[in-house]
Amino acid sequence: MALHSETIQVSGIRCERCVMRLGATLQDRDGLESASANLMGQVTLSWDDEQTDLSSLLGAMAAGGFHPVEPAESKAAG
């Protein structure tokens, strides 16, 4: 089992209910070891890469209305 962890910035978190909705979106996902979010839109995910991957977790979040925010440097360089 290889655990990975990453913190990403997402849009769609504006209140405590949004944080709870994100938690419900990710609840019971195979391979997800932990997830935490704050009101600033920072989400930290830890997962077992033998059972899932970041792309799948991001897809689940997107289905719930939460989308990764690109860093300002990436937008300026693109």
Image (cartoon, rainbow, N blue to C red):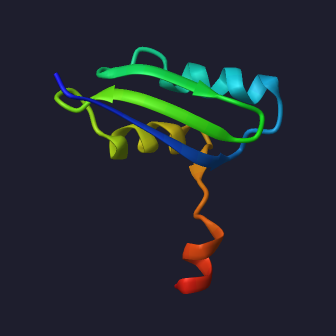
User: Against 20, is 68 above or below?
Assistant: below
Residue 1 picture location, percent across and down:
16, 22
Q: Nearer the viewer, residue 10 or 65?
A: 10
Q: Residue visible at 58% across and 50% down?
A: 67
Residue projecting furthest to the right: 15
Displayed quadrant of residue 56? top left
Q: In the image, is 12 to the left or to the right of 28?
A: right
Residue projecting furthest to the top: 28
Q: Nearer the viewer, residue 6 or 56?
A: 6
Q: Nearer the viewer, residue 65 or 74?
A: 74
Displayed quadrant of residue 25? top right
Residue 39 picture location, percent across and down:
77, 34
Residue 11 picture location, percent across and down:
68, 49
Q: Residue visible at 71% across and 31% down?
A: 38
Q: In the image, is 45 to the left or to the right of 72?
A: left
Residue 6 picture location, percent across and down:
44, 40
Q: Residue visible at 51% across and 24% down?
A: 35
User: Against 76, is 8 above or below?
Assistant: above
Q: Nearer the viewer, residue 33 or 22?
A: 33
